[in-house]
Amino acid sequence: MKLIRLLIETNLFIALAAVLFMWSGACWLNIPLEKLVFLSLQVFSSTWFVYQISRWVYFQKGIYTNSEEWVLLWFQQHPKFNRFTIYLSALLTIILTFFLQWTTMVVLLFIGIISVFYTVPILKPFGIPTRVRDFPYVKIFLIALVWSVTAVILPATEAHFPFDTRRDIWLLLGAQFLFIFFITLPFDINDEPHDKIAGTRTIPVVLGIRGAKILTIIIGFIYALMVLYLFMLENWIHLPSLHLQESTIIGLWLLILFLQIYTWFRSDTVPKWQIKLVYDGSMIIYFLLMWLTKLR
């Protein structure tokens, strides 16, 4: 368990989850994973960099106030190592980007700007110290946008996906947007007491914890219907061969059901690292379900 917590707090866990969730999008669209080698490495390094630099900024500004929080203890005990990982991940991100298709670079630039400015007060020169994430309700939508574009559009552009003839990509983009929204809302539920004190208007602060949990049930149900339609659509597109098995959709439904139950009974009471383990880890489970049940 200490090893898992170490992977979580060093952001290696979320970087791995980013790559595997992108691979799940490739599985949906039948994009060979061998075409995504450089993109996978780039997504891993860039995700690692963004999370490391944002947490380092929070650490330097003293935002972490809980003296027993793992991320605070890690930064305090290993400052040189953490600075090294920031420089290393930034260097790898830059180098690997030049191995990608130019259309992929354009999309990466778009989501990269959002990711970096998400924690940076871009309006500070105009006397407004507010960060993008501080605007009411914006945070969760930006996270869902960045992650869904990473999972769907990036592998499609890198593999020269026929956007003009395969309209299912936009349905998948919308579905994965909902999935990320669905697994991000419990983070805000868990943070609700702190956000209320800080005056940050999030969905749980406005609707209440119970209201936010009900919203996750609604979103999860809509997502379950969307993946069922996607399952039928993808199999129809790939006829006469079968693209996905029934066990794929059943596995994804069971994952959604587990997350629904965990959100309702546990999301507001467990430590933050467990929230990261369950919901960030769900992206890893998502890919494993897709890959293990996919017909060869």
Image: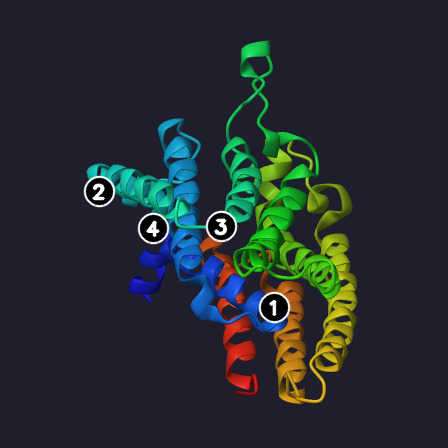
Closer mark to the observer between disc 3 and disc 4? 3
Dot 4 amino acid type:
Thr
Q: For the residue carrying disc 2, how many other residues have a C-alpha within 10 Å: few (<14), some (14-19), or many (20+)? A: few
Read off the residue under disc 2.
81
Read off the residue under disc 3.
101
Q: CA distance from mark 4 to mark 2?
A: 10 Å
Return the disc, 4 or 1, that comes first in the chain's sequence: 4
Return the disc, 1 or 2, that comes first in the chain's sequence: 2
Q: CA distance from mark 1 to mark 2?
A: 35 Å
Secondary structure of residue under mark 1:
helix
One can see residue 68 in this view: no
Residue in the picture at 74% in, 48% down? 208
Question: Quadrant of the rendered structure where residue 51 is?
Answer: top left
Is there CB contact under 8 Å for labels 2 and 3?
no
Secondary structure of residue under mark 2:
helix
Dot 1 amino acid type:
Tyr
Read off the residue under disc 1.
262
